Image (cartoon, rainbow, N blue to C red):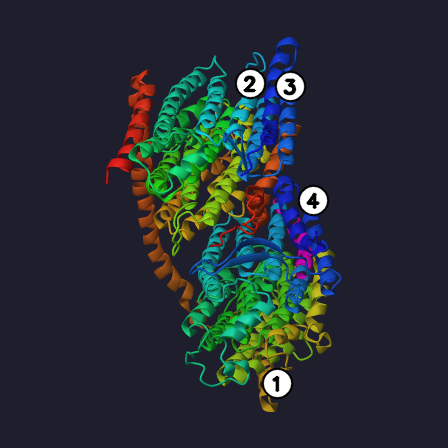
Amino acid sequence: MINASYHIAYFAPVILLTVWALGLLLAEAFIPLTPRQTAWTALAGLLLTGLLTLAFDTGPWIFWSGLCKWDGAAKFFNLFFVATAMLVIWMGDEVQEPVSHDGGEFVVLPLFTTIGLMLLAMANDFMLLFVALELVTISFYILVAYQRRNPAALEAGIKYLILGGLSSAFLIMGIAYIFGLTGTTRFDAIALELQFYLRTGVAFGMLLVLIGIGFKIAMVPFHIWAPDVYEGAPNSITAFLSVGSKAGGFIILMRVVLGVFGGPAGVGIWVPVLSVVAILSLILGNLAAIPQRNLKRLLGYSSIGHTGFILVAVIGAVTLLPGQSSPLYITDRITGQIAVSVYLVTYLLATFTAFIVLAVLNRRLPGLEIHHLAGLSQRSPLLAAAFALSLISLAGVPPLSGFVAKLMVILVAWNHGLYTLLFFVIFAAVAALYYYLGPIKAMYWSEPLDETPIRVNLSTTIVLYVLIVLLIGTGFWAQSFSSFVNNSYLAHAATHAAGSLAFKQ
Amino acid sequence: MDIAWLLLLLPLVATVAILLRFHRDPLNAIIASVGSASLCFIITLLVVFDWVPQPATWNWISFPASGSIPGLTIEVGMIFDPLAKGMLLIVTGVGLLIHIYSIGYMKADPSCGRFFGGLSIFMFSMTGIVISTNLIEMFFFWEGVGLSSYLLIGFWYTRDSAAIAANKAFVCNRLADFGFMLGILLFWKMMGTVSVLPEKLAQCYHQNALPAMHSILGNQAGLHTLFAHEGGHSPVFLTLMVLGLFAGCMGKSAMFPFHVWLPDAMEGPTPVSALIHAATMVAAGVYMLCRVYPLLALSNLGLEFIAFIGCLTAVGAALIAVQQNDIKRILAYSTLSQLGYMVMAVGCGGPAAAMFHLTTHAFYKALLFLAAGSVIHALHEEQDIWKMGGLFKKIPLTAWTFGIGLLALIGCPLLSGFYSKDLILAFAFHTHPLFYWVGSFTAFLTAFYMTRLYVIAFFGPARTPAAEHPHESPSVMTVPLVILATFSVIAGWSIWGYGIKDYYHTWAVNGQDIPLPELPGFYGFVPLVLVVSGVLAAYYLYCDRSTDPLDIRILAQKFYIDDFYDRSLVGGQQHAVNLLSWLDNWVLDGFIIRGAAYVTVGIGEILRLFQTGNLQTYAFLFSLGGAVVIYFALFAH
């Protein structure tokens, strides 16, 4: 590993975005900017950040005294977060009802969240991980409770704040244990030390860290906040939480369990734990979604279920292949990581499509219960089609993009002999159909109570069409899509020729 | 982007446009649907003359093999070999004519937009089946065809009979498709591919076939033994695979015992009966068999079974047709019988003959249905032949074209049906004389029931007031009749050179030229004599009658097969449905879902009582979860 000082250049996107965000905050204080001008300035900053990120190679480099790591995964997820943030800010400005714009914080804060998420993806040290995670969480506290005159939003904000604080306590306590027993907070140094033997204290610390991360990704039993907070937060922020925060959690989960504790000793402990919580997430998320009538709560529970699916891919990233001696064999780790990344991308597409539709409807319908959707297909075919496609994709029906993701998870589980998990994955996928089809039935086969057509403005129409094309396109061109993810993820790994779904043993 | 993809895109776009925009706007719906059909036909012509190349495939999914699972590569593409070209020509050509005819036939119907949407989705799926390069792709379109057939049979869904017929068709097809799916899975498992490209299939064939199997026509004896073969796959599984694939054909092509849906499908509008339930969709099963014929040839037992089922359907349906009175039902049973012929031809080792008969049949059966539609139209929706009569003079154009279709169907020399039927009988003769004799007897029956229909409906006195004042259909309906009549005459002439024969040779015996079989002298005359005697018998029996002199209950009641199904399967199924419904209501909905809901709601209600306790409970549960996780991970061993 080259550890030269000029690698600091890889910080450029983060620095650019930080400067842009601070500048925007200041400018906003002195120059009277309309909310729209603020939003589009923020979008421009994100676009520049994204382009700058694209310009970098994929390392891997460890720099800044080992605090940061720049590799394919970091680059991939940085781009992922920038894209997410752009959608969030665009939604906040264009689609949803004005969230009392007292100052431009509603636009600027997501920029800070994005900075935190980008740093998370680059973290190679528990200290940076913690600071970045707090940056994400604290900005989310404010965003969730932004509609502060709305009691539901306040309740959601308080719940998120207190439970988030609790989870941070678990996380920092775990880091303290690990640091105390190994004497370092660097991922690679700890991994070297713990490869074959794990003292109970370190294992304890690892589990505490997992609990802290479990909160971010909403895995059972640390999921309790999700439905309440999803329901209370503004639509764009719910989408951000559901996609950005979850993806951030998964990138550090992979960094920690596959990197730091990826040795045989660590794997022996966390694989059983994660297997059980994956099964619980699959069951609880998908069964509890069935009786839900509120669409945002329904998506909240389904998001818990999706955590279960992705966890299966994470577990598949290390499990011993049949007839293989070392669980550290790198190729199969990568398979699982690719599956996670593909899953998150398809999840992003479907979730944002769904929440954009909900945000549009929020203003037009008396509420966001399933029965309010009745006859939507007659009032606005585009919204109905977009919502139906996003739900079908989340359910994993071919040939939409969600199918590809689920197929990859199932193949990872199958190839690694995780038959118990596979059983639950399939059970959950079938159970999920039940509640995803409910809203579709309402939209297409119920008579509308109110026949007035719902008009959708031009930019929303365009974004929805783009998302629909991507939802269908990534499913149809599954091969190109997964190799694209594979290549952008692994471009650095000279030993792994980019190729198909990389399910080679 | 290759132009060829437009073949699929155009009807799809038309469907979507009609679905979203034009479903209450007949004029635009007609323009979209007929426009896409015409363009597709033009592209097909370009394809046939090789002016449009086969498009590059794109790799949809590709997994390398892993352990005991073979690799799965699905390369979606288009196949333009002689077989596909011939079929494409039929689908888009006949399809276009029927689109045009429908403009006249459906224009009075208020939901005519929906009808054209259904036709377009059918064209999309059917073209898809024809050009599929692998069985997964084909299965997708296969289901699409099933769906469009369901939609169009149930087009007049306010009629109970139409809704029931649509369900019946769908259920029969789904049942058979389950077998098809198993066949595809077995194929994939054994051969490690799902591709149906001729070169791939030839490879599968040569890797698994016994040396003795290479001669297809010469191999007449010992068909009943399952042969063993070193290196290849187990003959038992090969046979199961063949039967599975054939199951798909049995559903779509309505072979016994799945045939019951086709006559009921006549509840749909007549153009639908012509396009879907006579010319193209029901032929999809036969087309599929021809497409995968090298696989079928791996199992002699499978082929025998196919030939036997085909033969049974051919003669059974022809017998039933003798005692039917509804003009469309007679034609439906005649379609069944002809499909039986084609399947029998495949089973006798003659996919070339099957495709030849499919082609000629598509023309004259579409013609017969459209002419029947014209009759029905003229008599204000009257379908009972005993209420017609004397139509020959009043609607001469319809009567003449119907007559040409009839002659082609019964195998009058010089018309298309004669040649294709002869070829099938030749294949049958060289496989087993039983097939030949049953086939010839069917030819007699065909001549008999078709003459009966014609004599009753078109000659003699008018039996009802409506039949006295019919009016000839508009030219938008009669022009397609004339075009189809022309093709019914000329489609069998050898100037076309049996393009399908090329396909027959690509995989078979290392490019050797196998002569098509011929009937030896005497046997060649037998069918002709039988046909003539059938015509004469029906003419003398039915000329100037007003009631049916024959009364064969078992035939009129269709061998009681439908009743048997109603009593046994439908009755038994009702019990199963009741059980499932009970499970759904009480176990799934009641216990699991409502139970979970009540528990959730109950907990929520309890928590709501302690308004400040809510969050504390959350925090408590969170920490409890953490404790449990740590306990089990570290201390529970």
Mark nearest the camera among 4 and 1 is: 1
Residue A182 placement (x, y as % from top left): 37, 32
Can you give x and y, in whole percent of width and height, for residue B60 in the image? 57, 52
In screen coordinates, is A245 left or right of B123? Answer: left
Helix or strand or loop: what does disc 4 sit on? Answer: helix
Q: Residues within 10 Å of mark 4 (few under 14, many from 20)?
A: some
Q: Is residue A329 magenta?
A: no
Pick whichever of labels 4 and 1 is earlier in the sequence: 4
Distance CA(mark 1)–CA(mark 2)? 85 Å
State how far apart marks 3 and 2 are (Cα): 12 Å
Q: Pick whichever, A300 or B441, lies toward us.
A: A300
Q: Amino acid at mark 1?
A: Glu
Report in which chain the residue with disc 3 lies: A
Say if residue B6 shows up in the picture.
yes
Q: Which mark is residue A140?
A: none
The residue singled out by tag 2 in the image is A106
For residue A267, what is the image quadrant? top left
Foreground label between 2 and 4? 2
Relative horizontal placement of residue B111, taking residue B551 as reference (left or right):
right
Give the prevailing secondary structure in the magenta stretch. helix
Question: Which element is circle 3 on?
Answer: helix
Marks 1/2 in contact by CB < 8 Å: the verdict is: no
The amino acid type found where label 4 is placed reads Leu
Which residue is tagged 1?
Answer: B518
Chain at numbered mark 4: B
How many angstroms separate mark 2 from mark 4 (CA)? 50 Å
